[in-house]
Image (cartoon, rainbow, N blue to C red):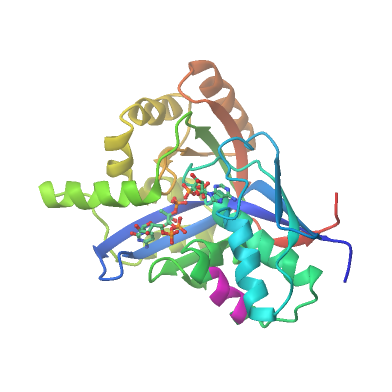
Amino acid sequence: MIGGATARVPAKINLHLGVGPLRDDGFHELSTLFCALSLYDDVTVRPSDALTLTITGENRRAVPADATNLAARAVAALAARTGDDPNVAITIDKHIPVAGGMAGGSADAAGALLAAARLWRADLPRTELLDIAADLGSDVPFSLTGGAALGTGRGEKLLPVLHRGEFHWVLAVSGTGLSTPAVYRELDRLREAGDLPDDAGTARPDALMVAIASGDVRTVAPLLHNDLQPAALSLQPMLRRTLRAGREAGALAGIVSGSGPTCAFLCADSDAAVSVAAELSGSGVAKAVRTASGPVAGARLIPQP
Ligand SMILES: C[C@@](CO)(OP(=O)(O)O)[C@H](O)COP(=O)(O)OP(=O)(O)OC[C@H]1O[C@@H](n2ccc(N)nc2=O)[C@H](O)[C@@H]1O
Ligand SMILES: Nc1ncnc2c1ncn2[C@@H]1O[C@H](COP(=O)(O)OP(=O)(O)O)[C@@H](O)[C@H]1O
């Protein structure tokens, strides 16, 4: 056995998030365009006598340091498949916002799978790793694959999407997280209460896919869409101000990231992103402001810190 392994895993945003009806299994049918962004968690797995979790990094608070952590659950799921000893020391260097709609927990699960597979030299076919990932959470397979991908089913069925160039984003991180199930429930409530005129449902975002392939940011900007946005805004009305502030600061478009409450602003280029970030930081609408670009690669092994 080697001394340990580290995986670096990106956050995600949904350039398009179309939510279909609630299924019998409690999940909603989705049609989503995932995009991995250059904001990363590093997950290290080392041999140990007991399962331990150490969380470092700017977003270490609010991350569970026990067996409920998605990274610990990922290691346990892989060990059950390979027969290896699940007692490992996991370290998560946490930079992805927690409960922010950026799949931070999923990233850590994907990182733990990759790092533990390396530690144990488990030669699993990629499809098997993706199956274990899907059992852990709907977003976990995408954290492994990264890039840009169309997600269907509950988000776990992925098709890579052609993309050209890099898009530049500013992320406004809220001080209070949102629970993903609560946001889906709020969407169901709003739908029951009356029509949400803007619902995309499970239609495939063809125009956006063509735009991503062209690399033309000004074609992409007006096509960003999130069916969960009205639900996130209903639970955190302050986000309207954040979205307005980003557009006023010069972003081409702003959208709630997934179930929120992080808001993602698409900018014309990297200079524009720096200037939007500076203005948003000064406006006081967000707890933290970050710049990031994408699509970037999914989970990958890096030299140990
Ligand atoms: C909304 C999205 C958009 O990418 O991500 P976030 O923005 O939260 O990161 C995802 O659908 C979240 O994926 P993930 O966080 O992996 O969810 P899971 O653990 O699989 O499911 C948590 C809960 O969310 C709801 N859920 C999730 C996925 C889905 N297609 N329909 C749902 O209704 C269900 O209530 C489920 O019990
Ligand atoms: N490794 C992890 N990192 C962050 N949150 C985790 C992790 N493991 C479990 N959680 C739990 O999952 C919840 C959702 O976190 P996260 O994945 O960051 O948000 P989102 O689903 O909005 O993308 C958190 O509130 C936390 O209780």
Image coords of residue 21 (percent x, y): 23, 64
* Magenta stretch, overall SS: helix
Front-most of residues 215 and 274: 274
Front-most of residues 219 and 70: 70
Q: Residue at x 49, y 61 (%)?
A: 139
Q: Residue 291, relative to residue 89: is it above or below? A: above
Q: Residue 31, relative to residue 97: is it above or below? A: below
Residue 64 included in the magenta stretch of the image: no
Image coords of residue 71 (percent x, y): 62, 57
> In the figure, is residue 53 to the left or right of 182?
right
Q: Dividing the image into 4 quarters, which one contains the N terminus?
A: bottom right
Image coords of residue 72 (percent x, y): 63, 58
Q: Residue at x 67, y 73 (%)?
A: 79
Front-most of residues 270 and 145: 145
Residue 129 included in the magenta stretch of the image: yes
> In the figure, is residue 87 to the left or right of 260?
right
Q: Residue 231, relative to residue 84: is it above or below? A: above
> In the figure, is residue 217 to the left or right of 48?
left
Q: Quadrant of ligand 1?
A: bottom left
Front-most of residues 271 and 30: 30
- What stretch of residues is rendered in magenta? 128-133
Q: Is residue 197 visible?
A: no
